[in-house]
């Protein structure tokens, strides 16, 4: 514990000069003046979560504690934590910003991000809890050949986590620069550093509780904001929409689907990625191992679906509230852009992602602005911690313990590898965050979802439900999905034209999201190479299905609360 | 679990009932969710103007209640599954586990 206290103190001390340093550097509109209220609230949040980490560190001894909080999280708590993982800064600021600029289009994204959850409840949550222990690869490799399937799952997990993590880190740096007036690199180092502390010392317990606290704060803040907006319009959404269509330059067009979806196939492909990607995100899937049994797993998704659905309805109101209250108030607008474009929407200070933040100021003054800014920062911290833990688990549990040590790893060694992996991922995230500072990383979240939907999800769902699946089929199909998703994104307009700077219209693939073909390719590959597989291993793979299915349905033999 | 024990459980009528009920409910609800969601996506892709039809004389368009319906249906379908599972599947599972214990 001595070492922990030392790190805790250093973390605090090193953050002090950083904050003071930020005060002197405010440059040309890209950064805001240092917001002391926000910093104060954020420091309070960090102090509180470090106390939780200290508490969790004392109770984290076994691998089960580290990976799955000892299975001691209740369904309701886990529901909040899952909702917290999902209510990232991207969805809070991004969706309200999208509603702010395009109105109805924001709702299309919210809906897509939500509808994966019922599928997870019906087909994945209980099955995962009954079959697995720490990672979803426990499930996919249950009856298949361990080594190859673990490597596939680890590749799928790490690639998904890496892209998601880069997107979050770059978003974090930009956001913190805007909110707190800190330099970009300091923000990235701060996020990466705190993340490493939470995960290495507190494991899943600390990560879960940080996520729960943040989820509650974010739900409270968003509820207050949406309530304040509706209050101004006598709780009549019609009155809010009427005013918004008056002041928005797109007028009535904000009340219907707009230009965001370029063609029908793109819409369907994006829909597939959003829906099935949810069921393949490693940091979400591992949450089902933190509860005591299948019943709690099932309940937790129910609560999570409720919280997330409610939250997305709030972000829609917040976006419309910002159209009315932010785009019409010169205090929140950049005068020079306003002069040029004559549009309050385009002239918003800090870009459309700041819509919710400015709205907080408009409805609740500086104190509430500070609160929402601190919560937005806390959101990023909590989400990157979950991601880092999922990535580290994949390295230590799937690769180190099961592949390298062939399932005979010493538990303490495994935890140590996991902590080293966390530090490695943290440093990597900081470096990549700094490298990608000026890159457009918006496509990376979409890519993470596409890979999750095209590699992790098909292998997971066929391993649970299809007797005919063989190791060879899963391996070839899974890698086909993974590779085609990555290639599809690189050749898509968003990367080929926008990020790589090729001329407009030259992208070889017209779909913005590759899920439509990469998911299809994965399922066809899995089916074809499984059916054609006549090897001896294929016999073993198919022969193991019945026993697996009984355990999947009943939970008999599942790692229970006692052994957990 | 050894081979003989899973075969014994497969013979248990409670187990067969559990598998039949859970599979049919799970896949049916998944299908309903897919139809609702992709119905919505197809409207977005092929009939954006329909979603932009105002309700009555106001500015609120039909797309708003339809979008809300998809969000609420996700929650309701999940609720239906969970309440069924809590009421029936857990009872069946308990019976199977009790029968399995020597």
Image (spheres, rainbow, N blue to C red):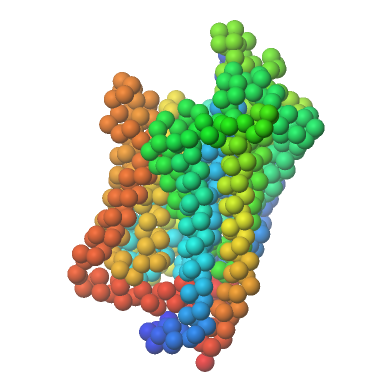
Q: Visible in this render: residue A217?
A: yes
Q: Position of residue A310 (x, y in %)?
A: 66, 46
Q: Is residue B56 above or below residue A414?
A: above
Q: Position of residue A83 (x, y in %)?
A: 60, 50
Along the line of sight, the residue nearer the viewer: A335 or B43: B43
Q: Is residue A168 above or below residue A279?
A: above
Q: Is residue A205 above or below residue A308?
A: below
Q: Is residue A330 above or below residue A266?
A: above
Q: Residue at x 30, y 71 (%)?
A: A541
Q: Residue at x 19, y 69 (%)?
A: A534
Q: Visible in this render: residue A418?
A: no
**Farthest residue in the front direction?**
B56
Q: Position of residue A508 (x, y in %)?
A: 27, 31
Say which quarter of the image contains residue B91. bottom right
Q: Position of residue A358 (x, y in %)?
A: 67, 26
Q: Residue at x 42, y 74 (%)?
A: A549
- The quarter of the picture where the C terminus of chain A appears is bottom right
- Residue A180 appears left or right of A484: right
- The quarter of the picture where the N terminus of chain A appears is bottom right
Say which quarter of the image contains residue A488. top left
- Residue A510 appears left or right of A214: left
Q: Residue at x 40, y 42 (%)?
A: A269
Along the line of sight, the residue nearer the viewer: A132 or A397: A132
Q: How many marks?
A: 0
Along the line of sight, the residue nearer the viewer: A290 or A563: A290
Along the line of sight, the residue nearer the viewer: A172 or A326: A326
């Amino acid at each position: 514990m001595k070492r922990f206290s030392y790190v805790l103190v250093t973390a605090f001390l090193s953050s002090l000069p950083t904050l003071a340093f930020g005060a002197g550097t405010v440059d040309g509109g890209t950064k805001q003046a240092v917001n002391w209220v926000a910093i104060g609230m954020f420091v309070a949040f960090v102090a509180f979560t470090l106390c939780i980490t200290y508490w969790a560190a004392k109770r984290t001894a076994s691998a089960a504690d580290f990976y799955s909080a000892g299975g001691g999280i209740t369904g309701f708590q886990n529901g909040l934590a899952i909702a917290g993982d999902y209510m990232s800064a991207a969805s809070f600021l991004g969706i309200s910003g999208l509603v702010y600029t395009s109105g109805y289009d924001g709702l299309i994204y919210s809906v897509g991000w939500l509808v994966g959850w019922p599928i997870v409840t019906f087909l994945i949550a209980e099955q995962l809890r009954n079959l697995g222990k720490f990672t979803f690869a426990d499930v996919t490799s249950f009856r298949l050949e361990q080594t190859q399937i673990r490597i596939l799952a680890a590749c799928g997990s790490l690639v998904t986590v890496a892209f998601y993590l880069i997107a979050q880190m770059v978003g974090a740096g930009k956001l913190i620069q805007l909110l707190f007036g800190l330099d970009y690199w300091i923000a990235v180092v701060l996020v990466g550093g705190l993340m490493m502390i939470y995960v290495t010392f507190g494991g899943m317990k600390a990560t879960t509780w940080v996520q729960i606290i943040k989820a509650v704060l974010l739900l409270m803040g968003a509820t207050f904001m949406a309530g304040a907006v509706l209050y101004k319009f006598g709780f009549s959404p019609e009155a809010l929409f009427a005013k918004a269509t008056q002041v928005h330059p797109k007028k009535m067009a904000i009340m219907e689907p707009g230009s965001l979806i370029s063609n029908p196939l793109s819409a369907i492909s994006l829909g597939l990625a959003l829906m099935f990607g949810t069921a393949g995100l490693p940091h979400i899937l591992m949450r089902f191992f933190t509860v005591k049994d299948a019943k709690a797993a099932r309940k937790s998704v129910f609560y999570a679906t409720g919280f997330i659905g409610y939250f997305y309805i709030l972000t829609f109101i917040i976006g419309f509230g910002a159209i009315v209250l932010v785009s019409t108030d010169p205090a929140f607008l950049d005068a020079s852009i306003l002069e040029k474009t004559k549009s309050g929407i385009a002239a918003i200070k800090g870009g459309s992602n700041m819509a919710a933040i400015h709205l907080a100021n408009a409805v609740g003054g500086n104190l509430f602005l500070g609160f929402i800014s601190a919560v937005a920062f806390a959101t990023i911290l909590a989400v990157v911690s979950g991601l880092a833990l999922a990535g580290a688990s994949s390295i230590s549990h799937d690769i180190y313990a099961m592949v390298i040590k062939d399932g005979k790893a010493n538990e303490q060694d495994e935890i140590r590898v996991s902590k080293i992996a966390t530090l490695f991922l943290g440093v990597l995230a900081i470096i990549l965050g700094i490298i990608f500072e000026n890159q457009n990383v918006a496509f990376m979240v979409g890519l993470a979802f596409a890979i999750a939907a095209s590699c992790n999800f098909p292998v997971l769902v066929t391993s649970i439900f299809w007797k005919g699946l063989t190791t060879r089929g899963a391996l070839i199909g899974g890698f086909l999905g993974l590779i085609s998703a990555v290639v599809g994104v690189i050749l898509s307009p968003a990367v080929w034209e926008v990020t790589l700077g090729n001329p407009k219209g030259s992208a070889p693939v017209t779909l913005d999201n590759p899920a439509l073909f990469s998911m299809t390719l994965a399922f066809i590959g899995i089916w074809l190479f499984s059916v054609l597989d006549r090897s001896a291993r294929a016999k073993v793979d198919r022969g193991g299905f019945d026993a697996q299915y009984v355990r999947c349905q009943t939970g008999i033999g599942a790692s229970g609360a006692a052994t957990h | 679990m050894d081979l003989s024990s899973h075969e014994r459980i497969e013979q248990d009528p409670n187990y067969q009932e559990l598998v039949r009920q859970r599979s049919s409910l799970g896949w049916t609800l998944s299908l309903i969710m897919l139809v609702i969601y992709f119905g919505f996506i197809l409207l977005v892709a092929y009939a954006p103007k329909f979603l932009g039809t105002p309700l009555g004389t106001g500015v609120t368009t039909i797309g708003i209640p339809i979008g809300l319906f998809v969000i609420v249906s996700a929650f309701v379908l999940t609720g239906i599954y969970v309440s069924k599972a809590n009421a029936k599947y857990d009872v069946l599972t308990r019976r199977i586990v009790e029968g399995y214990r020597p």
